Image (cartoon, rainbow, N blue to C red):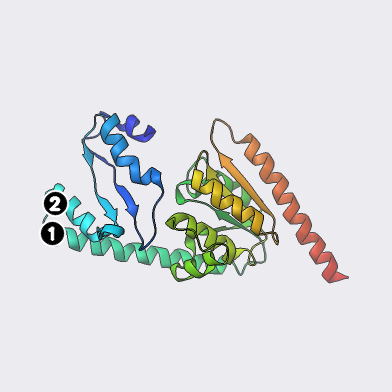
Amino acid sequence: MGHVINLKDKCDYILVPRLFSIKKNEQVCSTFNALYDLVHNLVDVNILNYNIDLTNKETKLIAFLSLGEALGKSYISTYKAYKKAETYQKKCRKESQLQQLEKLKSKKIKILLAGHPYNLYDAMIGEEIAKFLKNENIEVIYSDRLESSKIESECQKISNDIHFTHNKEILASINYYKDKVDGIIVLSSFPCGIDALCLEMVLHKIKTIPIINLIFDDLSSNTGVITRLESFVDILKNIRRQSQDEKDN
């Protein structure tokens, strides 16, 4: 909503999609469900919109065909653009997964950053944390780069009752990488209710690896976050050092 209000009177249109279900028998959180209605009723702006809801057979393709129509494009040109974008997205995702597999082979300390992409790659949240970790010579692994084929089976090892798509991805990644990294940093935004429930469950169930949960609200300063990160990294370095000493002895 803050972004929309900031863009008001600066753009001809603002794209505000409605995402309800992007995978079969799963749901996206209520924030994404309600965003279009909130903007439509509270802010006087011209909205471009599409709706994805697989529970009602409203697929991505149908959504983008209707968006193309709203922009004055033919179904054929919209379909070609959609397929081109879909192919490129799959290519980029495959490349990022292969890069991550290479990172897992590293002898450096490895930390999994687990959370929603809008936190993982935000300039003031995930990017700042990744920058700090890289300066500490730590390999950063990202939860959103897990192969799609592994999500269902890995998530069920923690819980078979999660039906929120993005949280299933986070839980699956944490379970899959927990034996492949030295520590896990969980990022979440206050007051995300789904994260509060799902991530709290992770903290209680996974005891074999150091985990820190960073909840972001006011971003006026990252001093407190850096202090916690420094302590967490020190713990991981001490564990690595003790493990090496035991091997040497």
Quadrant for the C terminus, please.
bottom right
| 31 up-or-down from 198: above or below | above
As shown in the figure, which amino acid type bears the numbered disc 2?
Answer: Glu
The kind of secondary structure element at disc 2 is helix
| 49 up-or-down from 83: above or below | above
Tag 1 residue: 75
Tag 2 residue: 69
| 95 up-or-down from 138: above or below | below
Q: How many marks?
A: 2
Q: Residues within 10 Å of mark 2 (few under 14, many from 20)?
A: few
Judge by depth and name the residue closer to the eye, 101 or 8.
8
Is 235 situated left or right of 163 in this image? Answer: right
Judge by depth and name the residue closer to the eye, 107 or 61.
61
Residue 52's spot in the image, x, y percent?
28, 54
Query: What is the C-alpha distance between the residues marked 1 and 2?
Result: 7 Å
Judge by depth and name the residue closer to the eye, 107 or 194.
194
